[in-house]
Amino acid sequence: MVHEGLDSARQGIRLAALAAGRDPGSVTLIAVSKTFGPAEIRPVIAGGQRIFGENRVQEAKAKWPELRLATPDLELHLIGPLQSNKVAEAVSLFDVIHTVDRPKIAGAIATEMRRQDRRIDVFVQVNTGGEPQKAGVDPAGADFFLRQCREEFGLPIVGLMCIPPFDQDPLPHFGQLREIAQRNGLTKLSMGMSGDYATAISCGATHVRIGSAIFGHRPVGGRPGPR
């Protein structure tokens, strides 16, 4: 089944990758379904998309178990901040967490992985813009935190994630994230959203998080749509 928003995003990724001299298959599309309900998500699944991103544990818990019963091969990524009291549910529900940014959360995730006997991929979020209101480890402390995650907590860190300031050119932020990843032996970069994913792909993004370009504008009030 054709889904226009999904097909447009896929074509945009393909063109951006080719322009950067990259294989389009090296870029993973995460369809960001936050605030949208199953009625809006099912057509995207029918269009062939299998990887989705959610910002909140409770919202994901309310809608994804049902969707996964119908389509068992779905992969769910947590791309929003994680609170310590939601870690157990997050490890149980999500396949990848993109937003590890402090020792308390890193340790809690590691503990839950052992307790649940479940190993999931983890990205460390870097606050490249140094924004006080935004989650993410400070770039100057990223190397130390990555060592701590690996050596002290034994987390399976696979890459880095960032969200550049909305009012700045994202290019330097993507470049900075790539440099931190390279010197720490990480190959995956979660960066780029609907408005800047082509720039992110030119800087080496392996995962782009696209929501509005696929689903359209968010529902009024940020609530999930009807079933």
Image (cartoon, rainbow, N blue to C red):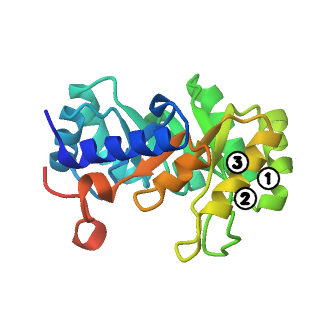
Q: Nearer the viewer, mark 3 or mark 2?
A: 3
Image position of 31 (left or right of 27): left
Give the image quarter of residue 172.
Answer: bottom right
The residue that mark 3 highlights is 178
> How far from the left and from the top, in percent, is residue 25?
46, 29
- Type of amino acid under label 3: Arg
Q: Is residue 210 left or right of residue 100?
A: left
- Tell me the residue at 34%/23% (across/down): 73
Residue 90 at x, y percent in the picture: 49, 42
Of the numbered discs 2 and 1, the one sitting upstream in the chain is: 2
Q: Secondary structure at mark 2?
A: loop
Which residue is label 1 attached to? 142
Q: Is residue 89 visible?
A: no
The residue lying toward the viewer, choosing from 93 and 211, is 211
Mark 2 → mark 1, Cα distance in angstroms: 6 Å
Callout 1 amino acid:
Ala
Tag shown at residue 137 = 2
Q: Residue at x 52, y 72 (%)?
A: 166
Please report contact status of discs 2 and 1: CB closer than 8 Å, yes or no.
Answer: yes
Seen in the picture, residue 204 relative to 210 is either above or below; the reply is above
212 sits to left or right of 200: left
Closest to the observer, 69 or 77: 77
Q: Earlier in the sequence, mark 3 or mark 2?
A: 2
For label 1, the crowd category at 10 Å Cα-Cα, with few meaning under 14, some 14 to 19 and many 20 or more, is many
Residue at (48% x, 40% y) in the render: 17
Instruction: Identify whether 160 is placed above or below 195.
Output: above
Q: Position of residue 9 (x, y in %)?
A: 33, 47
Which circle's residue, 1 or 3, is located before the other in the chain?
Answer: 1
Q: CA distance from mark 3 to mark 2?
A: 15 Å
